[in-house]
Amino acid sequence: MLQMLQAAWQKYAADSHSAAGAAVQLNFVNKETISRLHAEYFDDPKETDVITFPLPGPVWCGEIYICIEVATEQALVHGITIDEELSRLALHGILHLLGFDDLQPKARRRMRERERYFLKRFSLLTPIKRRRSS
């Protein structure tokens, strides 16, 4: 998974003047924590699978929070392994930190295309029944 995340980062951040010295922190949390974060920062108390926070500073950095319990449930629904779902969610978070958005249909399609590209490139792509928007 790390190799895939690094490749995504290099592809989209390579031209950025702030890419050098960047840091991304992956946090694996439970439903209680993800729900609290979602309520506090997005005014939505529902649990979710992944939340990303770009952090200001002298160098680019950000945090990604992934809910293990939700990821496990989604993996079961989609018929994929937990490792595959965690890879999807981590990549989704990286793409958000790199400026990709999924709020509008056109932007969501573009982001999903990038996800599929990297998952396929690293042989992590398994067809799934449906994907929840994050």
Image: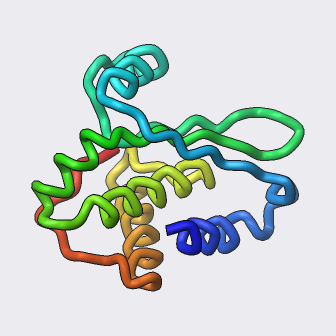
Name the quadrant of the C terminus.
top left
**Residue 19, position in %: x, y?**
80, 58
Q: Residue at coordinates 31% horizontally, 77% vertically from top-left?
A: 125
Image position of 55 (left or right of 45): right
Nearest the camera: 89 or 130? Answer: 89
43 versus 12 height, above or below: above
Residue 67: quadrant of the picture: top left
Q: Residue at coordinates 47% horizontally, 60% vertically from top-left?
A: 91
Image position of 79 (left or right of 4): left
**Residue 60, position in %: x, y?**
77, 46
Residue 32: quadrant of the picture: top left
Image position of 93 (left or right of 134): right
Nearest the camera: 93 or 99? Answer: 93
**Residue 120, position in %: x, y?**
39, 82
Residue 6: quadrant of the picture: bottom right
97 versus 119 height, above or below: above
Image position of 54 (left or right of 103): right
Q: Residue at coordinates 47% horizontally, 38% vertically from top-left?
A: 65
Nearest the camera: 71 or 115? Answer: 71
Q: Residue at coordinates 24% horizontally, 76% vertically from top-left?
A: 126
Nearest the camera: 69 or 41? Answer: 69
93 versus 39 height, above or below: below
